[in-house]
Structures are given as C-alpha cells and as structure tokens.
Image (cartoon, coloured by chain):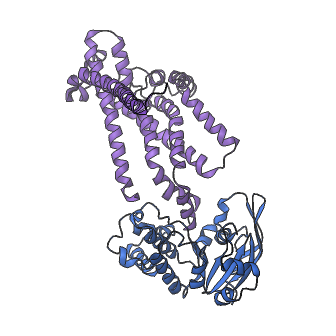
Chain colours: A blue, B purple
Amino acid sequence: MTPIVEARQFGVQIGGNAVLREVNLGVRRNEILGIIGPAGSGKTTFLRCINRLGDLEPSLSTTGTLSLDGTDVFSPGTDVAALRRRAGMVFAVPNPLPRSIYENIAFGPRLMGTRSRDRLDEIVERTLRASVLWDEVKDRLHTSGLKLSGGQQQRLCLARTLALEPQVLLLDEPCSGLDPISTAKIEEAMQELKKQLTVVLVTNNVKQAARASDRTAFFLMGEMVEVGDTGDLFTHPRDKRTNDYISGRFG
Amino acid sequence: MRLPPRFVHVAMLGALWTVTLVAVAALIGIVGWVLAKGLPSVTPGFLFSMPQASGAEGGIASVIAGTLFIILGAVAIATPLGVGTAIYLVEYTRESWVTRVIRYGADCLAGIPSIIFGLFGYVFFVITLGFRWSILSGSLTLALMSLPTIIRTAEVALRSVPQGYREVSYALGSTRWQMVWRVVLPGALPGIVTGIVLAIGRSMSETAAVIFTAGTVLPDGIPHSLGASSRTLAVHFYLLATEGDPETQHTAFATAAFLVLAILVINVSAYTAMHRFLARFR
C-alpha cells in the first residue's frame, strides 16, 4: 500500500526563511502518526501544508513534493476546497463558529449542497457519537456551540471535521488547552476513528504521542530527525537529539 | 503641589458627569423642542392628505412618498456598491497602493460638503445625463454622498470578524465567496447595518444636495415615476421655515417632528430586524 500522505524532499520557506527542510515522511493508511518536537520545529507548518491552509501566508513557498493519496497537493490544478475536505483539520484552540451545535456540524455538508434534513440529522448524530459528545449535547443541539465548555467545544470541532468525511484527520495540538478527561475522550475517539481514516496528530505533549500514536516522528528546527514505531522511538531512539527531547532535556 | 488622589477622583467624577449631562440635555432639548412644537399638528389627516396653498395648509402625504422613494433609491444604489467595495478591499485584495488610494478617496469624499455633491449631481445627472430634477437624480446624488460612510463602516465591520473564523471556514472546504457569504457577512452585519442606518439618517435630513437634484416642486399627488420631481421632508421644512410666514410655521414644525420620528422608527426597526436575523448566529 502506498502511503496516504507522502513528503519527498519537502521543504517550506516563509518570507525567505526555511521553516522545513528536506522532509521525507510517509503516513500509512489507518495509522495514528504522532508528530512531536519543540515550538518552532515546523510540525504545524507541515500539517498546514497537507491541506494547503498554509496558502493563507502569502510569502509561503515550497520545494520537493507533498502528496495526498497519490496526487501532488501543490500541483497548480488542485481543487483546494476539495483537498481540505479530504484532509480535515482540528485546530489547537477550539473554534466553533457562532451558531448552534447542529449548524456547526452541518456547515461542511451544507457547503457541498446537502439540504435534506434527514441526511443532516444523521450526519450530526453520527459525528457527535464518533467524537464522544453525543450523550452530553443530544438534548440541546440547537443551542450555541460557543456555550459549551472548552473540552466540549473541541469535540464539537472534531465532529464538524468528521462531517466532511475526510480520508485524513489533521489534529494540530488538539488537546493543548484541555483537561485530562476531555483529552482522554479525544484520544478514545481517535482509536475508534483510525479504523476508517488516518490521523496525523501534532502534539506538544510527548506523553500523549507515546499513549495515542502508532508511530511517532520527531521534528527539530525544520528537520524531520527520525520516525519509527512509537514503542521503538521512545525506548530506543536512534538519534541523540530525539533521546534528549523525549527524556525532557530540552524543548 | 500634588492634589490628593481621592480629591482628584471625586472632582473628575463630577466633571465627567457634568459634561455628559450637558451633551444629553442638548440632545433631549433640541428633539424635545421640535416634538413639542410640531407633534400636536402631526395628525392622521396631516400625514395622509396632499399639501395645499404651497404647503401652508393640507398635509404632507406626497412629500412623505417623495422622500421615501428618494431614500429607498439611494440606499438601493449605495448599499451594494458600498458593501461590495468594502468586501473587495477586505477579503479580495492585499494591502497595496490601490487599496490605499480607494480608502483615501473614500475618506476625502466623506469630508466634502453636501452642497458640492448637489452641484455635481445637478451638472452631471440633471443636465449632462438629462435626468432633470427628479427622484432618480436625487437618489443617485444621495447614493454618492452615502458611499464613503457605508464603505468605511462596512470595512471596519468586516475587519472586526475574527481571522480564526475565516481559517475555520477554509479548513471546512469553503471557497472564498462561501466563506464571505456564510461566515464573514453575518459576523459583520451589525456594523454594516449601522453604516446604512447612519447613511439613511443623513440622507433624510439632507437639503442642499436634494434641492439641486430632486428639485423643490411640491408634488400635488404621489409621485408615480423615477423621473418625477419631488421635495423631501427636510427640503419641505426648510422652504416653509424660511418663508417666515407665521401661517406656515405650524406645518413646518409638524414636518420636522415627523422627520425626527421617522428617523427614530427606521433606526429601531432596522436594528430589531437585524437582531432577529442574527439570533441564529450566536
């Protein structure tokens, strides 16, 4: 099987500075790939290139190739909106749109022209169940998404992204501001979700990567230092810098 | 010598109270005076009958209709142009000399006295384009006058929509226009409506620009075409009040009182309608 996401000699420059250099990394289908590394190591930039959200930074340019399911993400003919549905993203800060829980989830399907109430009802219930939020909100689907707690908001954002039916789920430090119980629920959801899709999990929390991911990649200062099975990487890191980072010597 | 902070606090509190009181009192005084002098004459008969004896007698039904048409026309022209320009400036371009020129132009336009707009409207719409003194010429002129207000308030409102909402919208697979239409515009609506309401208020109270373009003809029936000449309420009041004839004073003040009330009602209903619409976006 070819990797679902594959970076080859992939580099990113923003305003003339190299933010990522010659990254070679394949994300396997139906795995959870954790990406760890200190702030400024380029892990979020990498994530935002997969769905081309990096385009919002006008001075961003790339070298090498980055492909999603075999097609080059940066090729000129790419339908960016369609790409972003295939690679759905959840941000570090929970960011529901100012509308009801229901309408937050229906946002993506509505963009695609889904109008049928039954269909939308079904999507809302299915995605809320998948993000372990259904039981908490099923009686108030039409209240504002902004009224939920931070942890609930983040699971709402996860449900909203799942409503796009993505092939790849890009999680950008999804638990950075959350309490341990909400974090556990999101990790629980990930384990269930990887049966259908692939998860790329950027995290500042080394323990989370150790707990939740199948494989882990370590980024440092724009370089992908090493990648391996989570068990191996955390017990026998090949690179000294990885060892220093996971044992808490810096970062 | 340093004053005791406690004393300064009390003195400043008193001073701020006083200036606020003066400002509010001036507003209530002026509006109250106009309403007190005019309101007793604002009767259904006055509002729904045609003017007689050059406005000294009878009602203002045709003037109300003329005002309504001119203002509706102006808003219908200025809103899409103004909001469209603001959307272009905020969402579709990056900051460059072009956007700076557009913005600077809008600011200059906002500072131009209304009589200059009147003169331009007279020369361009009335004479050159041959629209004559008409509702159409008046609407076009007021639309031009309202544009800077609408552009700048809409621009500020659009910029105040958090950048994160745009990112989310993109991440959920929307095109730029879907993002603008479904996320940014609802978020910016309160500010945009404020700009439009402000422009309506200023257009309704405008005299100089309309005298030159819509004319001063007192219509004896409801105007039935865009080419018809008409007075607005403000012009009607101005002409009656400057005649200095005690006979016309009570109709003049009744017109003024109705104008003030009408602006109030428009403001309140615009905001109510907007809040009802926005209830699903919170």
The answer to whether B90 appears left or right of B12 in the picture is right
Q: Is residue B231 above or below residue B191?
A: above
Give the percent coordinates (x, y) of residue B160: 52, 49
**Quick one: quadrant of the C terminus of chain B?**
bottom left
Q: Is residue B114 above or below residue B179?
A: above
Give the percent coordinates (x, y) of residue A80: 64, 67
Q: Is residue B242 above or below residue A64?
A: above
Q: How many marks?
A: 0
The answer to whether A84 appears left or right of A123 in the picture is right
The residue lying at 36 percent from left, 12 percent from top is B242
Instruction: Kindly give the residue lying farthest to the top in the view shown.
Output: B245
Give the percent coordinates (x, y) of residue B193: 43, 44
The one of A100 and B148 positioned closer to us in this rendering:
A100
The answer to whether B40 appears left or right of B280 in the picture is left
The one of B161 and A229 positioned closer to us in this rendering:
A229
The one of A161 and B87 positioned closer to us in this rendering:
A161
Give the percent coordinates (x, y) of residue B16: 39, 30
The answer to whether A66 appears left or right of B105 in the picture is right
Res A54 visible: yes
Q: Is residue A238 above or below residue B209?
A: below
The one of A70 and B139 positioned closer to us in this rendering:
A70
Indicate the quadrant where residue B262 lies.
top left
Res A4 visible: no
The residue lying at 56 percent from left, 22 percent from top is B123
Indicate the quadrant where residue A239 lies.
bottom right
